[in-house]
Image (spheres, rainbow, N blue to C red):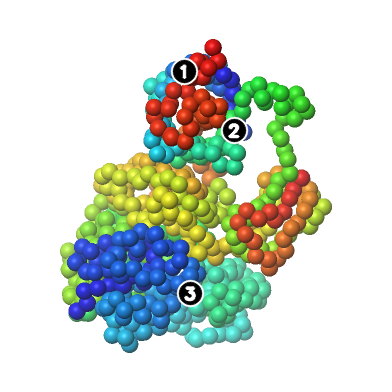
């Protein structure tokens, strides 16, 4: 059973060989993994090295919290991924970015307008929450497609404020 | 004499005070807003009363409601914790008027030290060095400030008279920058505190923020419990504290000098109970009074660890009219303590607050580790209160041991469900300047970057890949009904064998 597993933008080919062996990019590990009963905490012995981590789903992805580091992971069946790519997917999907309010708050400023070109890191919205002003930035370069909020407006958590294509 | 205490606060500090009361055999009364019904402090207290909606101004800041609960429950004393009403003179006064003991200083001490300009003037008159600035000259207008600025010298800071926390503050490097900066500072101060008055203060470059813990009783005894180093800050908010200060180190004469000046400052306002004098210290060991915090502080546990004094129990004893349990000679600093503030904030995203439910939590423990927290697995972090989840405090025989222990504890501490500042602290403890004790109040903002520190972090992406893949694989089997769904128990962890059986 082969998977393409992406960890923070790094791709690995993970093949489950048998009950005790997993190959990562061809390197074979002897594994033993157990789960704690009432929480998503796992103990993994990989070639006798002991690792402990939380693995849980979040927004269609997996998050692994291990040794204080949070890894963002996607796991895709290798065959399904190949079919998807052949169908014209072409590389990592870069769909429109929806800037959602991370928590309820008040929009202080919207320094962009629809149609404006933005760079990665440009401020899209300044949101005031928990007595602090937070600058919400664009994670990619692109064009501002829609601006759905204005200064002085109160927003709910998860509310879409700006879209960048 | 009172035998029941109302804790006018919430979260970890309410739990802290309740613990001290229990150890002294006192009954405890908790108050809670709509979202705090299941909070730890409510469950630990002997009695609990609902006081209103989540917004603090309708609940925890309502003096009338708090006094009503005190009367109803028969609480003879109120402990205000920190924040909320702890430094509101009118609250201390209202308690006094109702015949309820306020576990803290007298109203006039709070009022004097609460007005930054008045505080500077008062301690200055008592011979305490203050940061050079407009010395308690009342509320000055722009022309007067422009005239005084060159005498103070540049660079300088414009600061709000009525409050702190970085609001109403502007840095000015030259006289022509002044008018615009004054306008901006006044506007911000007006918005934040309802008072646009500002004063000027010399900006001490390369300054360290070092504070002294004070305890004073009603019998005329005032002592200090040594210093705390609080220079690891971001936007004037403390992130990490330690005691003793690596800058003071073995210089006992310097320590005692600062301590005695701090005592003098406290005596200048007839201070009672626990308090803290904040100093700015330059690289030549000149120290200047910055302000006095007339309350128990967040970082008090590190002083408790190195001196062995339970500050909250002392506050309660003082409030009961007892003399201090210790004389100045009996206070010794032993070993080294550090505190990491664990906030629900994302250090990879400008420390943006993170709200949500804490799904899982594993607390570090073992020798020399203390966790002061008010949350637990299943608790919902809301946007109504500050983002402090807990304080992780460690003690070591030396500073080096404390650092190793803090690293160990941070690795054990697992919080799932919200972003936390644990990675920030892990990265901080790897910085060579931090390890060498060479940092000032600008360190985090100017000389620290999460990305650079991450480059030094040991990561195991292949292991994360294995873990996630195996878990995802098991989910697939569960979805295909190959294994029993829902129950997540270890006997189900036969992901491969059954899959093989089905596909033979």
Along the horizontal axis of the image, is B93 left or right of A144?
left
Q: Position of residue A54 (x, y in %)?
A: 45, 37
The label number, if any, that marks residue B58 in the structure image: 3
Position of A151 relative to B142 (above/below): above
Circles 1 and 2 in contact, beta carbons < 8 Å:
no
Q: In the image, what residue occupies the spot 70% across and 48% down?
A: A98
Which residue was labeled with disc 2?
A: A74
Q: Secondary structure at mark 3?
A: helix
Q: Position of residue A12 (x, y in %)?
A: 58, 25
Q: Secondary structure at mark 1?
A: helix
Chain identifier of the residue bearing label 3 in the image:
B
Q: Secondary structure at mark 2?
A: strand
The label number, if any, that marks residue B497 in the structure image: 1
Q: Quadrant of the N terminus of chain B?
A: bottom left
Does any portion of residue B274 appear in the rendered image? no
Q: For the residue carrying disc 2, how many other residues have a C-alpha within 10 Å: few (<14), some (14-19), or many (20+)?
A: many
């Amino acid at each position: 059973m082969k998977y393409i597993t992406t960890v923070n933008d790094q791709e690995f080919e993970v093949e489950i060989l048998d009950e005790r062996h997993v190959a990562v990019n061809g390197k074979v590990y002897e594994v033993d993994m157990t789960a704690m009963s009432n929480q998503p905490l796992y103990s993994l012995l990989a070639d006798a090295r002991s690792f402990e981590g939380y693995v849980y789903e979040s927004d269609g992805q997996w998050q692994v919290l291990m040794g204080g580091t949070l890894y963002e992971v996607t796991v895709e069946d290798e065959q399904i991924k190949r079919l998807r790519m052949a169908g014209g997917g072409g590389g990592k999907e870069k769909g429109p970015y929806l800037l959602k309010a991370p928590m309820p708050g008040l929009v202080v400023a919207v320094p962009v307008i629809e149609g404006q070109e933005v760079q990665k890191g440009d401020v899209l919205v300044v949101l005031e929450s928990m007595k602090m002003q937070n600058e919400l930035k664009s994670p990619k370069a692109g064009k501002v497609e829609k601006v759905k909020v204005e200064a002085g407006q109160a927003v709910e958590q998860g509310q879409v404020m700006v879209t960048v294509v | 004499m009172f035998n029941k205490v109302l804790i006018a606060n919430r979260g970890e500090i309410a739990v802290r005070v309740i613990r001290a009361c229990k150890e002294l055999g006192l009954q405890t009364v908790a108050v809670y807003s709509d979202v705090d019904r299941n909070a730890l402090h409510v469950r630990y207290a002997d009695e609990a009363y609902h006081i209103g909606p989540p917004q603090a101004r309708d609940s925890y800041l309502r003096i009338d409601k708090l006094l009503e609960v005190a009367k109803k429950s028969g609480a003879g004393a109120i402990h205000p914790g920190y924040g909320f009403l702890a430094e509101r003179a009118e609250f201390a006064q209202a308690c006094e008027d109702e015949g309820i003991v306020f576990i803290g200083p007298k109203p006039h001490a709070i009022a004097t030290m609460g007005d930054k300009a008045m505080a500077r003037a008062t301690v200055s008159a008592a011979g305490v060095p203050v940061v050079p600035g407009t010395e308690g000259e009342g509320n000055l207008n722009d022309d007067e400030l422009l005239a005084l600025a060159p005498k103070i010298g540049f660079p300088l800071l414009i600061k709000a008279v009525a409050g702190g926390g970085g609001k109403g503050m502007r840095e000015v490097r030259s006289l022509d920058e002044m008018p615009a900066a004054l306008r901006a500072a006044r506007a911000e101060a007006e918005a934040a505190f309802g008072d646009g008055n500002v004063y000027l203060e010399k900006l001490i470059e390369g300054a360290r923020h070092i504070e002294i813990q004070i305890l004073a009783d009603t019998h005329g005894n005032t002592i200090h419990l040594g210093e705390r180093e609080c220079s690891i800050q971001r936007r004037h908010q403390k992130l990490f504290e330690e005691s003793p200060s690596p800058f003071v180190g073995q210089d006992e004469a310097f320590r005692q000098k600062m301590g005695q000046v701090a005592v003098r400052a406290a005596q200048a306002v007839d201070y009672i109970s626990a308090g803290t004098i904040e100093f700015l210290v330059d690289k030549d060991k000149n120290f200047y009074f910055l302000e006095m915090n007339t309350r128990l502080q967040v970082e008090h546990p590190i002083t408790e660890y190195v001196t062995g004094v339970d500050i909250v129990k002392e506050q309660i004893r003082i409030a009961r009219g007892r003399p201090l349990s210790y004389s100045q000679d009996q206070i010794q600093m032993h070993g080294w303590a550090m505190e990491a503030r664990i906030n629900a904030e994302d250090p990879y995203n400008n420390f943006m607050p993170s709200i949500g439910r804490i799904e899982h939590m594993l607390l570090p423990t073992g020798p020399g580790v203390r966790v002061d927290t008010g949350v637990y697995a299943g608790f919902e972090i809301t946007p109504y209160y500050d983002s402090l989840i807990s304080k992780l405090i460690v003690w070591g025989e030396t500073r080096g041991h404390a650092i190793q222990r803090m690293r160990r504890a941070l690795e054990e501490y697992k919080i799932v469900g919200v972003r936390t500042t644990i990675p920030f602290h892990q990265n901080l403890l790897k910085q060579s300047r931090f390890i060498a004790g060479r940092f000032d109040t600008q360190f985090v903002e100017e000389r620290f970057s999460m990305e650079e520190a991450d480059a030094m972090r040991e990561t195991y992406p292949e292991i994360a890949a294995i873990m996630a893949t195996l878990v995802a694989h098991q989910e697939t089997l569960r979805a295909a009904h190959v294994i029993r769904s829902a129950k997540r128990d270890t006997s189900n962890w036969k992901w491969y064998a059954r899959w093989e059986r089905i596909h033979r």
